[in-house]
Amino acid sequence: MPIVVRIDVELARRKLSVGEFAERVGISPANVAVLKNGRAKAVRFSTLEAMCEVLECQPGDLLEWVPEEGSA
């Protein structure tokens, strides 16, 4: 998948647990795991906004586009 989710990096930088993050964002820890593991097919802007607010970051800090091998 060319979109890489970097939530784990931001959580580690802030020493924030998945459970605490999930509670503050208003989603389940299972949904955080789905996002972290790259299994999510979509993310709501309201959820992305809440994640950025909790982590005091920009959306680009959480999401990165990485080209697939073989694409130019």
Image (cartoon, rainbow, N blue to C red):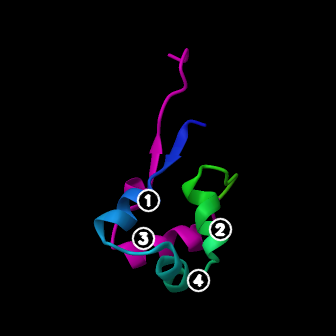
Residue on which disc 1 sits = 8
| Alpha carbon distance from label 4 to label 2 | 10 Å
Residue on which disc 4 sits = 26
Percent coordinates x, y for residue 48 in the rendering: 52, 67
Q: Which of the 4 quarters of the picture holds residue 16? A: bottom left
Rendered view: 51 above or below 71: below
Which secondary structure lies at badge 2?
helix
Please tell me whether residue 53 belongs to the stretch shown in magenta. Answer: yes
Pointer 3 or 4: first along the chain: 4
**Kind of residue indicated by mark 4:** Gly
Percent coordinates x, y for residue 30 in the rendering: 66, 69
Please tell me whether residue 49 belongs to the stretch shown in magenta. Answer: yes
| Alpha carbon distance from label 3 to label 2 | 16 Å
Pointer 3 or 2: first along the chain: 2
Which secondary structure lies at badge 3?
helix
Rendered view: 1 above or below 51: above
Residue at the far right in the pictured view? 41
Which secondary structure lies at badge 4?
loop
